[in-house]
Amino acid sequence: MSISSITAATSIPAATGPRAPWRDWVALALLMFPVLLVAVDNTALTFALPAIATSLSASGVQLLWIVDAYPLVLAGLLVAMGSLGDRIGRRRLLFVGSAGFAAVSAATAFAPSAEWLIAGRAGLGLFGAMLMPSTLSLIRNIFPQPNRRRLAVAIWAAGFSGGAALGPIAGGWLVEHFWWGAVLLVAVPIILPLLVLGPALIPESRDPNPGRVDVPSIVLSLLVMVPVVYGIKTLATHGPAPEAFASIGAGLLMGYVFIRRQRALARGEGTAPMLDVSLFGNRIFSTAIIANVLALFSFNGFILFLAQHLQLVEGQSPSASGVAMVPALIATVVAGLLVVPLVRKVRPGFVVAGGLLLSAAGYFLVAFGDHSHGPSLLLAALLVLCLGVGAAETISNDLILGAAPADKSGAAAAISETGYEVGSLLGTAILGSILTASYQGNLRLPEGVSGLVPAEATSQAGETLAGAVELAHMLPAPLAEAVTAAARTAFDSGVHVTASIALVLMTGACVLAAIVLRTVPKAK
C-alpha cells in the first residue's frame, strides 16, 4: 500500500462542504499548542527537582516517582486513548484532554506535599495520553492530500522538537525567577487558545463503525505498557536488576495475551478490537514504526551522555548546557521541513534511510573522535545526528499515517506516539546502562583517596561521574585533579563503547529502511 493510495472517505467531519485552505492551517496552528505543552512538560520539570526537594521535603524515592508517574501513565494509556478517540471523536477527546491537563496542572502547581505532586503528575499522564494521538490523527484527517499532510506532519514534529528544546531553558528560567510550581502553571495560558478557538476551527472526525468499547483490552494495554516502561526506566536508573527484567517480562507476557485478544475480537462481531494488529502486517507501517523508535533511541541516548559531558566534564551550568544544544535541536526542525519537498524527487524510503545514516554518522564522530579538547566535536556530532533524526522522524510519521486507513488514524497515531515513548526510554535505558557499566569497569581511582574521605563518597565515585566530581571537591588539589582525570578517562571510554554500539544499530536500521521502504513511490 502506498502513501498516495489512501483516502479519507471514511472519516466523519463535523461540518459538510469544502473547507477553506486557511482554516486547515489555522487548525494546525491550534493543534501545535498541546504538542508544545506536552513536549515542554517532558523536559522542563527536571530543572525544578532541587527546588521541589527543598520545598516539599521530598525523599529520593519520591523525586523519582515525581518524574516517573507522568511517563508511566502516559505510555500505558496512549493506545487506549487513540482507540477511544476513533470511537467518540478525536476533537472531543482532544478538548477533554486539554481542559483536564490545564486544570490538573494548575492544581498540581500548588501541591502541598510530594504525594499530592505525584498524584498530579499521574493525572497529567492521563490527560496527556488524550492529547498527542488526537493531534496527529486530526492532522491525518484535516490534510488527506499527501503533500499537504506531509508538510503538516513536519510542522507537528517541529513543534515537538521545539518544545523539547524550549523545555530546559523555560524550566530553568521559571524556577530561577518564580517558584517550581510556575513550570506546571504555564500550561494554562498555553492551552487557552485551543480551548477558545478550537471548537470553531478544528473539524471533528471519528471511525464511522467503531463497535463497542472492550474494557478488558484497555486493562491489558495498561498491563503491557506500564510494566515494560517501568522496567526500562529501572534499568536506566539502577542498571541491570532482577526487578527490571521481571517487570519487562511480565509486560511482554501481557502483550502476547493482548495480541491474541485483538485477533479474536477481529474475527468476531459486535465488540471491535482496540488495536487493529493487522496494521503491523503492512511492511511499510511496521518498518516506519521501527525507524521512528530508533530515531528517538539515537537522539535520547546521545543527549544522555552529552548532558553529563557538558556539565560534569566541561563544567557548564544546566542552563548553559541546554543553550549549547539549541542549534542542533533547531537543525531537527529545519531538517524536518526541508525533507517535505525532497520526497518529490527522492523516494521516501531513501530519505528515511538517509536520515538514519546521518544519525549513524553522528555516532561515528563520537566513537572514533577525540573528546579531550572541549565540547566542539560532540556538539558537531549532535548537529549531524539531529539533522538525521529530523528527516527520518518526519517521513516515518507520514508513512505510518499514510499506511493506515483514515478511520483508524487515532490508533495509528497512538502507535506512533508509543514508539516515541519507547524509543526515548530505550535510548536512555540501554545506552545509559552500557555507559554506566563501562565507566564502573574502567574507573581507577588514585591511591590514597580512600583514607581522606568517607567510604560512601568513594563508593559513589565508583558508580557515577557525578559522584567522582563530588569526591574531587573533598580532596586537596593534586588528588582532586587525579580523581577528575581518572573519572573523565573512564567516562570517555564508556562513551566510545556506547557510541560504537549505537553506530552498529543505526547502520542496521538504515539498511533495513532502504530495503523495505524502497517500494514507496515518490510524492506527486
Image (cartoon, helix red, strand yellow):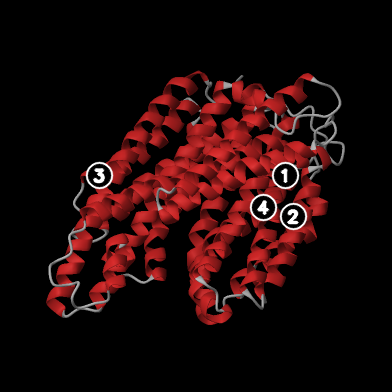
Amino acid at pointer 2: Gly
- Residue at the location (40% across, 69% down)? 318
Q: Secondary structure at mark 2?
A: helix
Q: Nearer the viewer, residue 10 or 17?
A: 10
- Of discs 4 and 1, which sits in the foreground? 1
- Spatial CA distance of label 3 from label 4 is 40 Å
- Spatial CA distance of label 1 from label 3 is 40 Å
- Spatial CA distance of label 2 from label 1 is 10 Å
Amino acid at pointer 4: Ala
Mark 3 vs 4, N-terminal side: 4
Q: In the image, is 303 to the left or to the right of 48?
A: left
Q: Secondary structure at mark 4?
A: helix
Q: Which mark is residue 81?
A: 1
Mark 2 vs 3, N-terminal side: 2
Find residue 178 and report its horizontal and vertical position in percent.
57, 81
| Residue of label 2 | 97
Q: Are marks 2 and 3 in contact (CB under 8 Å)?
A: no
Classed neighbour count for the residue bearing mark 3: other residues with Cα under 10 Å, few (<14), some (14–19), many (≥20):
many
Q: Are marks 2 and 1 in contact (CB under 8 Å)?
A: yes
- Residue at the location (57% across, 39% down)? 250
Q: Secondary structure at mark 3?
A: helix
